[in-house]
Amino acid sequence: MAVTIRDIAKHAKVSVTTVSRVLNNRPDVKSETREKVNNAIKEFEYSPNIVARGLVLKRSHVIGFIVPDITNPNFPELARGIVNKGRSYGYSVMFYDTNHDHKVEKEAIRLLRSKQVDGIILSFNEANKEELEKLKLEHFPIVQIYRKSNNPVVSTIALDNISSGYMATAYLLELGHTKIAHISTGEGVQSGSERLQGYRKALADAGLSYDENLVLAGENDAEAGKRCMRKLLSFPEKERPTAVFICHDSMAAGAYDAIFEKGLAIPDDISIIGHDNNQIAQLIRPKLTTIDTFKYELGEAGVDLLMKEIRNDKPLNEEVVITPKLIIRNSVRKLAK
Amino acid sequence: MAVTIRDIAKHAKVSVTTVSRVLNNRPDVKSETREKVNNAIKEFEYSPNIVARGLVLKRSHVIGFIVPDITNPNFPELARGIVNKGRSYGYSVMFYDTNHDHKVEKEAIRLLRSKQVDGIILSFNEANKEELEKLKLEHFPIVQIYRKSNNPVVSTIALDNISSGYMATAYLLELGHTKIAHISTGEGVQSGSERLQGYRKALADAGLSYDENLVLAGENDAEAGKRCMRKLLSFPEKERPTAVFICHDSMAAGAYDAIFEKGLAIPDDISIIGHDNNQIAQLIRPKLTTIDTFKYELGEAGVDLLMKEIRNDKPLNEEVVITPKLIIRNSVRKLAK
DNA sequence: TTGTATGCGTTATCAA
DNA sequence: TTGATAACGCATACAA
């Protein structure tokens, strides 16, 4: 049987109230009795039941974290950021992987709430908006990750995907490329749609017209990247792009494949820039020039924001936007004039 | 203010006991009153406070999960297996990433216990044995992952690393290779040491002698793989291995690099077999022949075992061993006689 | 079939 | 500076 505050009180010959006082470092306790109590605590290796404490304090010091798929290479670092930052606030994190299933998302929220988490950090692919609205109505602290929005339903930590799309494309333009294709995840995925916007904006700012034939879309995986790249390479050589901005590193890896099977070289024949700076970006050859998205920092910022939400009694609806960064490696070349 | 069992009782004009009864699907309640209660529950969208319930039941329905580094590509899938299987048991999982820090491991255990988790699944690099012994003395349910041992301190889910090392080496032997090198993580890392054992055993069974010059060790990362492979390639051509079994896919990716920079081809000049079947194994070119380690299933099995531990009042000290599987891709060639 | 009273381990209120 | 008591939200022994 676990030792409780009562056992400590008994053996220190004081009341439970007093034990509670020293547990919470209250000043109003004589140093002798404090010592007595601390000795008993040490002797019994007593550690307070935080669950019981939470029951009376109405604060569990647990946050929920929901992702659609932790094997997506962007999430593990995010998770680390959340866990470590959470720990610095004295918070633990309860974790759910929903496998992109809306029903499971809903269930995860219900479960986490009945487990009395103080707030939830979540990343839903397509905003499960009704759920969020409901949570918001109840003033339940929520932070959503990766959902930049002009009219956010809840507080949000987002990457500036328009900037990153712009940045990637501008870099290619800078090096003399003008026929720049884009492999996207399509308009249906918010991040993809935003990166596409950035791409278009960069082209426009350079005075180039937008050619929809140069924009292909597929799932976020290597296979789709390969398929799209094959299509681009099937164009007559004159119409073939000299550079491609690809929405995700994993798709870029697939694109590499299509390029190599055609007997072409990167970046000599075609330049590639990815997005996300995942581990593979450094493992494929040539190393992939890409955009870093500060996943760890995003997780940390998410916790910071959630803590603000928890401390506030009204929803803040803040939006923290993180600026991505270009990582230059070896997959892009300067185009001769 | 959250709605409680008392609110429901009041509005259904019954006692809290009755509400509790319908909440727990007890048979001894008239169907009319059951309906009354259920209506009130629906009306208020009431969901019981599982924390309070746990306080009286002495069961939180939460398990802890501690890993040294979730960005290690083996862990996300493991985590998924644990979360999903846990959910099927009605369990949530509280997650810690310790960044390989023993102090943090210790703190994580303390924190999880004071949060009243019913058991912990953990993966420590070097068994933090004192901690485990202590937990065991208290009969606290623990399952350790990846620590195969003849004399396990606690219940364990392990990969049969000796088999996998054997399997990888035997495959190379089968294809005619006799000068087979091994890039390892060294004796200090248990899994590495075991895979090395398997390697040696396979050589011995084939009547080949062990050449310690062909066994190099480094950290589990691409850089180390590259460094070790460079060393192997610096041997006079006659002494150069025709095949290398590499302890981790990530190291293999680095090894690829060293091979390409020498102007050699895989598998034409040198065959490579990896270990783990991580995502990169399919993204690098040629696709890496490797050993699958059933990470998701390992996670599931870990939960199954932990549930058994939780239901039992005495530690079971069981060991579940999962057999790895060879995944043939394109990085190994058959050697002409 | 239903309700009253008690307790789970803790903190807060109030009085001493 | 200390302690008795109630309360947090729930489940259960026991009584009715």
Image: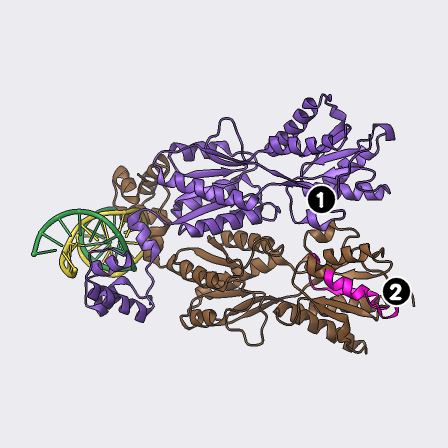
Chain colours: A purple, B brown, C green, D yellow
Callout 1: chain: A
Q: Residues within 10 Å of mark 2 (few under 14, many from 20)?
A: some
Tag 2: amino acid: Leu
The image position of residue B51, as x and y in percent, is 36, 51
Residue B27 visible (yes or no): no
Please tell me whether mark 2 sits on a helix, a strand or a loop: loop
Check if mark 1 and mark 2 are on a common chain.
no
Label of residue B335 in the image: 2
Residue drawn at the location 28% of the way across and 39% of the way down: B12
The image position of residue A274, as x and y in percent, is 69, 39
- Residue range (magenta): B227-250
The image position of residue B143, as x and y in percent, is 51, 65
- Is residue B21 shown left or right of residue A149? left
Q: Front-most of B222 and A236? A: B222
Residue drawn at the location 82% of the way across and 40% of the way down: A268
B333 above or below A86?
A: below
Q: Farthest residue in the right direction?
A: B337
Q: Farthest residue in the front direction?
A: A337
Image depth: mark 1 or mark 2 in front: 1
Can residue B245 be found in the magenta stretch? yes
Q: Quadrant of the C terminus of chain B?
A: bottom right
Q: Are marks 1 and 2 in contact (CB under 8 Å)?
A: no
Label of residue A329 in the image: 1
The answer for how far apart the CA atoms under marks 1 and 2 are is 36 Å
Residue D12: name its quadrant. Answer: bottom left
Callout 2: chain: B
Can residue A206 be found in the magenta stretch? no
Tag 1: amino acid: Arg
The image position of residue B73, as x and y in percent, is 63, 54
Residue B188: name its quadrant. Answer: bottom right
